[in-house]
Image: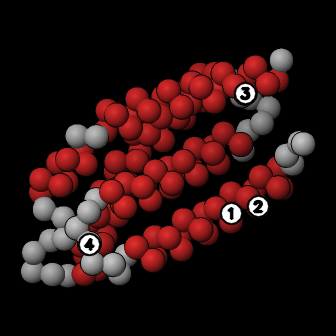
Amino acid sequence: MTWSPSATSLWLRFSAIGVGILTLLWLPIEDTNELAAIFIALLISGLLALRALLGHQHHQSLLRFTLIGGLAGAATIPIALLLLAFKTGLHSHGAPDFPADQIIAVLRRTPFFTTGGLLLGLGSGTWNISRRS
């Protein structure tokens, strides 16, 4: 089965709509757990990486996959922090929903997500190259 660019584009659009709906469902919930924000940020950065990789079918290299994977992994934490700040701003409590120690705990995960993205990019690039040859 081969994927056409229009089918890939349509799949990515519906996935982005799904992530947007998930985000809108998460925002009004009163919780103080940062894991949902990290999960949504992972989905967003993963969709951005897929868009970058699937947009240029003619130039696919192992280095490109690895770098985009690493950037997507590294971008997960700033996206999660933006989501946490946005949710805190929407609820407008006297005390923030996410205290400083939770923000620091999220920031400390940056090397793990970057390494995971690099490894995922390396693995998917290797798979893509082996599939083509």
Taking the spot 90% from the left edge, 42% from the top edge, the residue there is 1
- Name the residue type under label 3: Asn
Which one is closest to the eye, mark 3 or mark 4? 4
Q: Do the residues labelled 2 and 1 touch (CB within 8 Å)?
A: yes
Which residue was labeled with disc 4? 31
Compared across the picture, whether 62 is left or right of 41 comes to right
**Is disc 1 in contact with disc 3, using a CB cutoff of under 8 Å?**
no
User: Which residue in the protein does label 2 denote?
Assistant: 10
Q: Earlier in the sequence, mark 2 or mark 3?
A: 2
Q: Name the residue under label 3.
A: 128
Residues marked 4 and 2 touching at CB (< 8 Å): no
Q: Which amino acid does label 1 sit on?
A: Arg
Q: How far apart are marks 4 and 2 (CA)?
A: 33 Å
Residue behind mark 1: 13
126 sits to left or right of 113:
right
Distance Cα–Cα, label 3 vs label 4: 40 Å
| Structural distance between the alpha carbons of marks 2 and 3 | 21 Å
In percent of width and height, residue 49 lies at 57, 44
Q: Position of residue 42 (x, y in %)?
A: 46, 50
Secondary element type, mark 3: helix
* Amino acid bearing label 2: Leu
